[in-house]
Image (cartoon, rainbow, N blue to C red):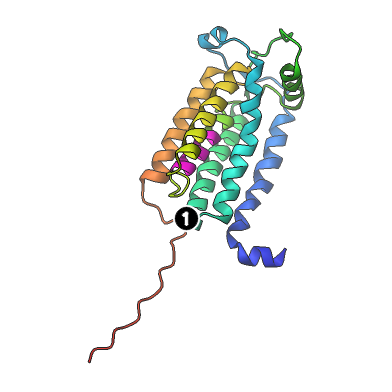
Amino acid sequence: MKAFFQKYKHAWVLLYGFIYLPWFFWLESRANQPYHVIHVWLDDKIPFVEYFIVPYLLWFVYIAAVFLYLFFKGTKKEFYRYCFFLFTGMTLFLVISTIYPNGHLLRPTELPRHNIFTFAVQILYQADTPTNIFPSIHVFNSIAAHRAVVNNPKLGRNRLIYGGSFILMISIILATMFLKQHSALDVMAGIVLGTLMDQIVYRMEFSFARERVPKRKRETVI
């Protein structure tokens, strides 16, 4: 373990988990308390489609895969940018949910069909409360992952990876609404926040772990 942290000193960012996880589970523990209901007219127009459980669950793999790739294969600058993107939005989400308890009443009282997909949705509903939803972290983090892929010199030039990442990002965003996990308002807030963070992280010049450039040897003048 000591050798690992000596080799990968940027692993210190994992300490953020000790902030995020306790805070998040504390928020979830307040699910039975009064909260502001988030709802817009578009929510009533979107049907429940259980097949979107597939991209919704792939979100966990997607976010982790980009994280691990940049951790082991990317530059520290790329890795720190990705973490800064993720952690900023996630922290803002925690603050908003603490100050403004929120949730929705969109989940169907009865699932229309019984199959392996609706079974997975039932498990999801039992594990995740319909509270603390604004803005959608599924949406925000998906944007962060895709932008990290696009801005990586190797991944961004691979059409298959680029296209697959884009399709997965869009599928996850749609899944949050078609599974009735989020209101369209949560999704729009996640997109706006993600777009803003993209401008900050990838369009503005910040010193994210500047790469060390070896000093040039002085040329001997004869």
Tally the numbered discs.
Answer: 1
Q: Is residue 10 above or below residue 53?
A: below
Query: What residue is shown at x 48% (from left), y 42% (from top)?
Result: 149
The rendered magenta stretch, by its main secondary structure, is classed as helix
Query: What residue is shown at x 61% (from left), y 30% (from top)?
Result: 97
Q: Quadrant of residue 99?
A: top right
Where's residue 195, x and y in %? Answer: 43, 33
Query: What residue is shown at x 51% (from left), y 26% (from top)?
Result: 170
Relative horizontal placement of residue 206, taking residue 14 as reference (left or right): left
- Split into 4 quadrants, where in the image is the C terminus? bottom left
Query: What residue is shown at x 58% (from left), y 35% (from top)?
Result: 95
Going by the numbered disc 1, the residue's amino acid type is Lys
Q: Which residue is mark 1?
A: 77
Q: Is residue 190 magenta?
A: no
Where's residue 145, x and y in %? Answer: 52, 39
Q: Is residue 29 above or below residue 34?
A: below
Q: Is residue 90 visible?
A: yes
Q: Helix, strand or loop at disc 1?
A: helix
* Extreme-bottom residue of the structure: 222
Relative horizontal placement of residue 11, taking residue 162 as reference (left or right): right
Where's residue 67, x and y in %? Answer: 58, 47
Q: Which residues are magenta?
A: 141-150
